[in-house]
Amino acid sequence: MTLLPGLFFAVISGLIGLSASTELRRADYTATCQEIATAVSSASKVYYNGSPQYTEDNEHWASSSSQTSACSFEPANAQDVGIALQLLAKDQTPFAVKSGGHSANPGFSSTPGVQIALFSFSEVVYDSNAQTATIGIGLIWDDVYSKLEQYGVTVVGAKTTGVGIGGIVLGGGYSYLSNQYGLSVDNVVAFELVMPNGTVANITNSSNPDLFYGLRGGFNNFGIVTTVTMKTYAQSQVWGGLITYTADQWDAVNTAIANYVSTVTDPKACLYSTTDYASGVTVILTILFYDAPTYPDGIFDELLAIPHSVEDISTRAYLDLIQTLPANASSGLRAMFHWVPIEQFTSSMLQMVKNQTLFYGEQLSQSSGVLISYDLVPLLPSIYSHSDTPAAFPSLRDSGQGYSFIEVYYGWTDPNDDEVMLQVGAESAAYMKQFAVDAGQDVANALLYPNCAPPGTALTDMYGDAASTLHSIRSAVDPGNVMGLTGGWRF
Ligand SMILES: Cc1cc2nc3c(=O)[nH]c(=O)nc-3n(C[C@H](O)[C@H](O)[C@H](O)COP(=O)(O)OP(=O)(O)OC[C@H]3O[C@@H](n4cnc5c(N)ncnc54)[C@H](O)[C@@H]3O)c2cc1C
Ligand SMILES: *[C@@H]1O[C@H](CO)[C@@H](O)[C@H](O)[C@H]1NC(C)=O
Ligand SMILES: *[C@@H]1O[C@H](CO)[C@@H](O)[C@H](O)[C@H]1NC(C)=O
Ligand SMILES: *[C@@H]1O[C@H](CO)[C@@H](O)[C@H](O)[C@H]1NC(C)=O
Ligand SMILES: *[C@@H]1O[C@H](CO)[C@@H](O)[C@H](O)[C@H]1NC(C)=O
Ligand SMILES: *[C@@H]1O[C@H](CO)[C@@H](O)[C@H](O)[C@H]1NC(C)=O
């Protein structure tokens, strides 16, 4: 069965002469590349296959998210982004917009057409009066935390090394600081946006409430963002880091996590526990976080007392803690994510997740599954209540209910296994959600995090009733559907 799609395509192409028209289209894409190179300022660059910049521009954390583009474009300023959008629209050439390239969904930030890479938007400007930072969208969070350290401040961004600014500030953004300050989208003050017609505007809550609402969760539906201005917070040294356990301590760790979530309500504390199954061996990698140089007695004692293999815990800079989880080590695999909302991690739920890890770890290792990971992210139910300004995601502010969650991550090598991995991930996520519902947890209608939802997820499963409002906002700013030439969630 696995050979059939290719064969099918070859037959169909031959029958209707698709290969000739595909070739024509390829040539068209290169023509657009040349038009862009001619029209933009000399600071902006177009690169072709063979150059190191082209390789970097097309690279993604997951290999299944990369494609061979006709060329890559690195705009140096917003005006040149606008010129490129107008030419892409004129030629109807597909394109992709990439910030940190961590989307695991194929085609969300990759294309056979023009790959736009935003690396040149790389400034961080701190405004100590306004207590905001204006951040270039082509950076990764590591760079931003590092640059803000000298001022003793930080922003609410990703909790893992290597992740881009773009997908986080346009998609949600769960951080170690979310219990205190909400999601990344809650902390955005302004976006510099290149609209689909090429016009550049600074979008704020007062200048354009519709777009400000849509951009916070709505990704690339409204144009291309070049900088984001975010609230900053005083940041001292933090306490914590990585502690790892072998599988023989699994039950003890589950008991300690259940005790932690049922007693700790201090918003400065955070816990992130990933369980990774690889070739029959399970390792538990847990990050302990406290937003101060020392943690109050008691909170993490039980977890620290369990025999462990690695302990990289100290009082340290925020960035230093972020970099203790070795997330770069799993880059380069094919990948999928899924997401299960949870009200509370009870002992029985943690045991259920253990069974899922072992059950699917063993099953998927028989195909090309390399890394089967079930990650626990306990959060306070108040995380969605840090902003009075509605956002596209999460759009359930009125109910005031925030969720903890389980992240499912599968990494594998064989493209022929893509379909089965997605299918099994969905089956496991559905099983876990049903388990929570059966245990009386109110998660049946909880919306999925669009940054961890797999390809094909219905818009209403992520945006609920807001999907139609978001469609209207998109139609107003993009009547010609220019952004329909790129991949991602389409309103
Ligand atoms: C190792 C790893 C760790 C992660 N850790 C976290 C975490 O701690 N917290 C969390 O919330 N999520 C996390 N995620 C999920 C993460 O939120 C998504 O992968 C996110 O989309 C990554 O953003 P990016 O800019 O790197 O990705 P990209 O693939 O570059 O972009 C993602 C989407 O946003 C669009 N986009 C990006 N920039 C722009 C722009 N300037 N204008 C318009 N559209 C744009 C792209 O077109 C694409 O559709 C993690 C993922 C991985 C793989
Ligand atoms: C956009 O507006 C915000 C808030 O007024 C401001 O801090 C930021 O500098 C502006 N950005 C640009 C690119 O003009
Ligand atoms: C992870 O990779 C990025 C480049 O994509 C790099 O900037 C970052 O420093 C790496 N993180 C660690 C901890 O090595
Ligand atoms: C373990 O998980 C599998 C797959 O969801 C399920 O079929 C099985 O019943 C579970 N086993 C236990 C003991 O819960
Ligand atoms: C955004 O505007 C609305 C309506 O004018 C207002 O209620 C809200 O407080 C504003 N939010 C921010 C963050 O300024
Ligand atoms: C581009 O679109 C925006 C939003 O619809 C509009 O305000 C602006 O006038 C348009 N620009 C041009 C040059 O038509």
Image (tube, rainbow, N blue to C red):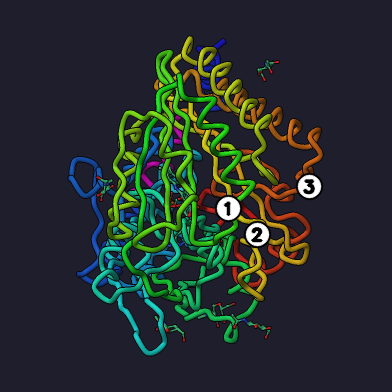
Where's residue 396, x and y in %?
Answer: 73, 60
- Which secondary structure is most common in the magenta stretch? helix
Q: For mark 1, what is the residue?
A: 264
Q: Extreme bottom residue here? A: 129
Amino acid type, residue under disc 3 in the picture: Asn
Q: Which mark is residue 235?
A: none
Q: Which residues are magenta?
A: 18-30
Residue positioned 45% across, 78% down in the render: 200
Answer few, some or many: residues within 10 Å of disc 2's Cα (few below 14, many 20 plus, some between 14 and 19). Answer: many
Residue positioned 42% across, 47% down in the render: 288
Q: For mark 3, what is the residue?
A: 445
Where's residue 117, x and y in %?
Answer: 33, 56
Amino acid type, residue under disc 2 in the picture: Pro
Instruction: Give the position of the N terminus as an image quadrant.
Output: top right
Q: Which mark is residue 394?
A: 2
Q: How many marks?
A: 3
For marks 3 and 1, the one nearer the N-term is 1
Amino acid type, residue under disc 1 in the picture: Val
Q: Extreme left residue here? A: 51
Position of 190 relative to 169 (above/below)? below
Q: Is residue 171 magenta?
A: no
Q: Is any part of residue 156 visible from this angle?
A: yes
Mark 3–mark 1 distance (CA, rounded to whole Å)? 26 Å
Q: Is any part of residue 115 visible from this angle?
A: no
Q: Secondary structure at mark 3?
A: loop
Q: Secondary structure at mark 2?
A: loop
The answer to the question of whether label 3 and label 2 lie on touching residues, with beta carbons closer than 8 A, is: no
